[in-house]
Amino acid sequence: MTRKQKRMTVIFGGLGFLALAAALTFYALGQRASYFYMPVDLQTAQLAPGQRIRLGGLVESGSIVRGEGTTVRFAVTDHENTVKVTYTGILPDLFREDQGVITEGSFGSDGVFVADSVLAKHDENYMPKEVADSLKKKGLFVPDETKPAPGS
């Protein structure tokens, strides 16, 4: 083998290694990705059994039921459709009815969304961006313009 052939072999071997590393990285990121849905979006979504998603909306009034231990059942709504959710764990302090929430998890075999994390608003001016944008599109959420924006 000439010097030039050895150099080309090393270069192509390095490029092949980098391509393999990039492919494995993108594959791993794709497996971990969870997509955001509103309850109305779930009617048309083609979800694989056990697929992780983020479900966002408002906690429906009168739907919070505390069970044994730290298990809580509640419903997430966008005022068109409602999805029942079960969560076992400690809820955020500001979790309450008629407030924006994003849950992450997957649907169980009984059709109930089993959440493994719950995110709630952090002050009176905040609603998760995805939830606010989806509700604004449907005309169900109008921000209060009389209140100053956070940080101003």
Image (cartoon, rainbow, N blue to C red):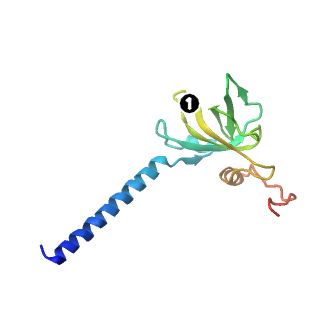
- Three-letter amino acid code at the position of disc 1: Gly
Q: Residue at x 67, y 22 (%)?
A: 68
Q: Position of residue 95 (x, y in %)?
A: 74, 39
Total label count? 1
Q: Position of residue 52 (x, y in %)?
A: 52, 41
Secondary-structure class at tag 1: loop
Left or right relative to 13: residue 97? right
Q: Residue at x 80, y 59 (%)?
A: 150
Crowding at dot 1, Cα within 10 Å, few <14 / some 14-19 / many 20+, comes out as few
Location of residue 17 with respect to 83 vertically, above or below: below
Left or right relative to 136: residue 125? right
Give the residue furthest to the right: 146
Location of residue 124 with respect to 151 vertically, above or below: above
What quarter of the picture does the C terminus occupy?
A: bottom right
Left or right relative to 144: residue 110? left
In front of the other: 116 or 128 = 116
Give the residue furthest to the front: 3
Give the residue furthest to the top: 68
Q: Position of residue 78 (x, y in %)?
A: 69, 43
Quarter of the image where one finds residue 25:
bottom left
Location of residue 11 with respect to 105 vertically, above or below: below
In front of the other: 106 or 38 = 106
Q: Position of residue 13 (x, y in %)?
A: 26, 65
Q: Which residue is labeled 1 in the image?
A: 111
What quarter of the picture does the N terminus occupy?
A: bottom left
